[in-house]
Structures are given as structure tokens and as C-alpha cells.
Image: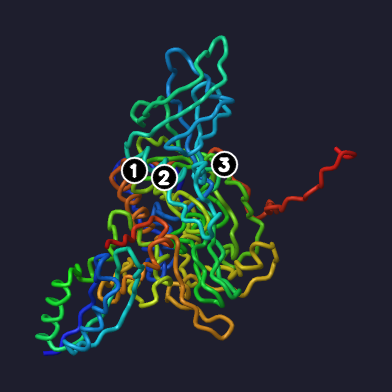
Amino acid sequence: MLKTIDEINEKIKRGQAVVVTAEEIIDLVKEKGSKKVAMEVDVVTTGTFGPMCSSGAYFNIGHTKPRIKLGGGKVYLNDVPAYAGFAAVDVMIGANALPDDDMRNRVHPGEFNYGGGHVIEELVAGNDIRLIATAYGTDCYPRKKLETWINIEDLNEAVLFNMRNAYQNYNVAVNLSDKTIYTYMGVLKPRLGNANYCSAGQLSPLLNDPLYKTIGIGSKIFLGGGIGYITWQGTQHSPGVVRSDNNVPKRGAGTLAVIGDLKQMDAQWLLGTSMYGYGITLTVGIGIPIPILSEEILVHTSVADKDIFAAIVDYSDAYPNVKPDILGEVSYAELKTGVIHLQGKDVPTGSLSSYSRAKKIAGTLKEWIRNGSFILSEPVAPIPSADSGLRMKLLKERPIDETSG
Amino acid sequence: MVIRRKIVLHFPQRSVDRPIVFRLIKDYDLEFNILKASVTPDEEGLMVLELRGDRNNYDAGIRYLTKEGVRIQALSQDVIRNEERCTHCGACVTTCPTSAFAVDQETRQIQFINEKCIACGLCIKPCPPRAMELHF
């Protein structure tokens, strides 16, 4: 090991840490070689800003007089249903939640103009949120109805808690059918009319630490414009997928669960997002610092778009019907040229993840570390890596009938 | 001097059943290309046109339209990008039939080239942060 996290933190406190972004490191390693750069550079910062559906927030609204027990009742925030399955005044809202009267896809494609993601964005922006709740009433919590404005400033706690974020690589989505389809990967035009991808590629956190050597439980991160932490591997964490020689997965692989105080976040980095004909999500800004503890870790951070490959998947059939077929693999460098060649056609590409914003996140995190305001944390436990053999499983459906169970 | 302009015409309810645009060709010798039209009886009509012709004829044609009660807007005002909401993701790029969005290869920011926009509105709903706004 070249350095420890403690030694790097000492340099950060003295204002002497050498910090570069995951984009800047690529040319640096090309010019000087990995051995030299591994000694010189202390931290590489990454960033990503894309729609991350399994995001949500929980908060404690404070007790009312007389008391009300929301748990087991119903709670709406700006007409969007929130989850009230906890104690008296704890409430959770998921990014995908929709108002009861939303048309959804009854008229296809649904517009999906407002939902949980927008409530979270508005809460963080400091807007008043309309809370309407009903409860069943108990001897100790007699109240049955509550209608009030709430504001993030007045909440006891307001916490962003995302169970799956920062996907390590993702599918490139296309449509082989004869009609336009509306997916979480955007609007896909018929007969390979376009190809949409969603990753910050060479800037993306987990693509720069493909075997999770430094990113683990307890890692301190940039989250939604403020500080957050990694709490666990994310749901569907699947490190056992096929990888290139550089250890970078060629399919959706690792994921992260993250947490942070919403009160210090910025709505610019937590954006309510509408996927036409699909639903509501939250676009989340995440940046993770990678301490350069060894030459191997450095080499991983120097990965470039041309060395990161993603699978092209047909979202009209293969994806919805869970067929394993892919139409090919393509690098992010090719995707970023604006056109890929597929089945004899030039297919224009579009991105759902903002590279320019990912770059801004990596740059912001770099500044925070350079000026000493962001000290790295030591992970308390690793997340399962490629050697764990862990793969995401499909549901084994077991029909319910009266004789079994 | 020959000029070419894209404009949006708002027809008042009462004039929808009269051949106003036809007179632009016949009396003012203007060429036009209809980019979008939404004309329904008993409602305000809307048409997006590209007009081409001699400058004097063009000006006279516009005066004629105004006299007939048609409200005219320059097209570039019609689809607007809310810069605060745009994240420069790029989901719009392949939705546009006239390539009015381009990726700056250096900054990876998305340029909205107003002059290419025909205000068809195809980019409005697919924009994930809903940054594209149609103003008529």
C-alpha cells in the first residue's frame, strides 16, 4: 500500500492533497505513467447525475396537539401518497409515487407531470408542502384528521434515503418494433430510430472503482449537493456479471444505497423528473472520492469511455419479456459520437444522464477536498465484490392455491 | 430583397372560415410552407408558417394579416428552454425532427438552436426535467 486514508486526510487538512477528477486522471496517467501518478495523486473524484428511481425521503413532522398517529392511516403530500407504516409522525415518500387521480397510462402514453420526485425536490427547495392525513384514532392518539402546510425547516428530521443509486453501468436501450415505445429509458422510436444510454461513463463512481476496493459501507460522498454516506450495497447489487479485462462490468452490476440529511442538500441536485409514458423519478447528483491507496486503484480510475462497454437491449421485447439476448456491445466513446452502427443502420444516440453535470459534481467535490472542507471517511465494511459470485435473481413465482402454503 | 421568416399566426375565432392565407399567395406573391396548423371551427386557429418573398410584399402581407385580426409572433419565441431546469442530459437530441439540439463535444452541454426549431412540440413531453416549454 502506497498511502493510507489517514495519511491522505492529514494532507487534506494541511491543504496539500493532490486531487484530480476522474476525467483529468486519464491524460495524466497517459503522460506520466501509472507508477508515478499513483505516488503523486491522493484522491480522484467522480460524479454522476441521472434519474435514479429507487430514491426516497423520510421525515418526522413533529407531534400535533392533540396527538395523531399517522402509522396505519393515510398521508398525502401535495396530493401524492406517502407511506405511513411507521410510528406516530414518521412519514416516507418514494420518488415514483403518483397522485391517486393521476391518469397514469389510461390514455397512453401518460404524461406523468407530478409525483414523489417532485415533492422531494420542492421540499428541499424550501417550498411549503401540503400535508393531508387521516388516522383511526386511539386513546393516546385521539386525532383523526390533519391538514397543514409543512416546511423542511420545521421538520425534526428530513433524510434522503435511496435504496438503489449510482448503477455501475447500464443498458443501451433501443426499439426493434414498428411502433414508438415509452420507457424509463426515454422515448424509443421504432425500427432502431434511436438508442438511449444512461451513465456518466468514465466519470461514474463505480466504473472508477470497479471492484469496490475503496467504496464501501460508511464512505462519505457528495449527495444531492450536500454530504451523504453509503449505507449498504444497493438493491439488485449484482457484482458477478461479465467484465472486461480491466475489471469493468459490461452490464448493469453494482449499486449503492445512500443516505444524507436533506436539510443541507440543494434542489439543483435532486430534481423531480418525468419519464413520459413511464412515471416519475428523481434525478440525483452523486460524487464519490476515490483515495489512491495503490497503483491498482489508480489504474482503475484512469479508465476512459473507449474502455467501458455496455449492452444494447431491445426494450420492445427482450427487456419486458426478460430474454437474455443482446444486440451487441458498444463503448461509451462510440455512444458519445452521437451515432452508433447497428444492424446496418446509423442509429442516433441520446443520453439520460448529464455528463456536464457529472463533471460539475466531480469538480465541486475536488474543490471541497482541496480546500479542506471534505475529509475522507474510512469504510467500516466492504460491499460484496465480483468474487462473491452474487448475481441478481429473478422472482420464482409460485402460484397460490388453497391446497399449498 | 428576398426574405424568409418563420412566424406563428393566431386566427381569431371569426376568421377561421375565411381563406386568409390563400390571399398571401394571390395578392402578395409570397411563398409559404406550413410547419404546423391547428384550425378547428369555433376555436382560435393556430398556424406556424415559413414565409418567403420580396421584403415589401412580406411587409404588406403582414399588414394585411394584422388588419384581418390575425395576431403574429416570431417563431423563435415559441419553444423556450427553461435554462434553470435543463440538466443538459441529452434526452431531447433524438426527439427533434429538425436537429435543433446539438451536443457540444467539448463541454457535453446541449445547444438549442432556435433557428432550426419549427415549434412542433415533440421535445416537450420527452424532456425528463420538463425544461422545454411551448409558449403560444
Per the rendering, the mark at residue A136 is none
In front of the other: A329 or B11: B11
Give the mark toward the camera: 3 or 1.
1
Can you give x and y, in whole percent of width and height, for residue B121 in the image?
A: 36, 67
Say which quadrant the C terminus of chain A sits in.
top right
* Between discs 2 and 3, the one toward the N terminus: 2
Tell whether A354 sits left or right of A82: left
What separation in Å lies between label 2 and label 3 (alpha carbons)? 25 Å
Q: Residue at x 24, y 88 (%)?
A: B31
Residue to which mark 2 is pinned: A118
Q: Which residue is drawn at 47% across and 52% down?
A: A112
Determine crowd level at label 1: few under 14, some 14-19, many 20+ residues with C-alpha closer than 10 A: some
* Element carrying mark 2: helix
Can you give x and y, in whole percent of width and height, for residue A369 in the image?
A: 34, 46
Q: Callout 1, which amino acid?
A: Asp
Q: Callout 2, which amino acid?
A: His
Can you name the residue that lies furthest to the right here? Answer: A403
What separation in Å lies between label 2 and label 1 (alpha carbons)? 13 Å
Tell whether A398 sits left or right of A289: right
Give the mark toward the camera: 2 or 3.
2
Q: Do the residues labelled 3 and 1 touch (CB within 8 Å)?
A: no
Residue to which mark 3 is pinned: A232
* Element carrying mark 1: loop
Write down the chain letter for disc 2. Answer: A
In front of the other: B50 or B89: B50
Can you give x and y, in whole percent of width and height, for residue A182 in the image?
A: 53, 63
Write down the chain letter for disc 3. Answer: A
Residue to which mark 1 is pinned: A266
Determine crowd level at label 2: few under 14, some 14-19, many 20+ residues with C-alpha closer than 10 A: many
